[in-house]
Amino acid sequence: GWFGAIAFIFLILLQYFRLAKIIVVDRHTSHYLMPLIFGLAIFWPFFLVDQYKISILRVMNYQMLIWLYLGISSAAIRTFKHSRQATKRGAVDQKAGAERVAP
């Protein structure tokens, strides 16, 4: 029904805005997930326009593919955030270690 359609669109928009935020904030990062994140950020608006035009979700196999793309988007966002936090934590640890070693 309507609530399911709204929830589905909300999930897609949520993933899109998270991907877009990563692209805007960390665009100079040479992380291995950036090409995937960039591609997914381009994919979701085109999917929404396509969905609005032809209502393609009538085919059950296509619905599963969209859920897979949502899962891949979520995994890419989560992996990128965890690696970014680990990098920041490592830089802080190295800085603290250098201060301890220096007389």
Image (cartoon, grey):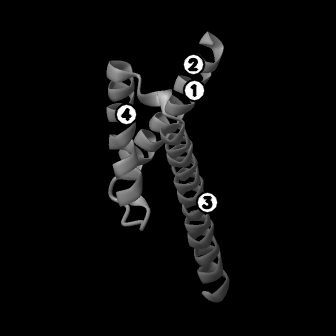
Cα distance between the residues tagged 3 and 2? 31 Å
Residue type marked 3: His
Q: Secondary structure at mark 3?
A: helix
Residue shown at the point (41%, 52%) measured from the top left: 37
Mark number, residue 5: 2
Q: What residue is disc 4 on?
A: 47
Q: Secondary structure at mark 4?
A: helix
Residues 3 and 16: in front is 3
For the question of whether residue 94 can be seen, the reply is yes
- Residue reaching furthest to the right: 100
Residues 102 and 70: in front is 70
Residue shown at the point (33%, 25%) measured from the top left: 49
Residues 45 and 89: in front is 45
Q: Secondary structure at mark 1?
A: helix
Q: What residue is disc 1 on?
A: 8
Q: Residues within 10 Å of mark 4 (few under 14, many from 20)?
A: some
Residue type marked 1: Phe
Side (left or right) of 91 relative to 22: right
Residue shown at the point (32%, 34%) measured from the top left: 46
In front: mark 3 or mark 4? 4
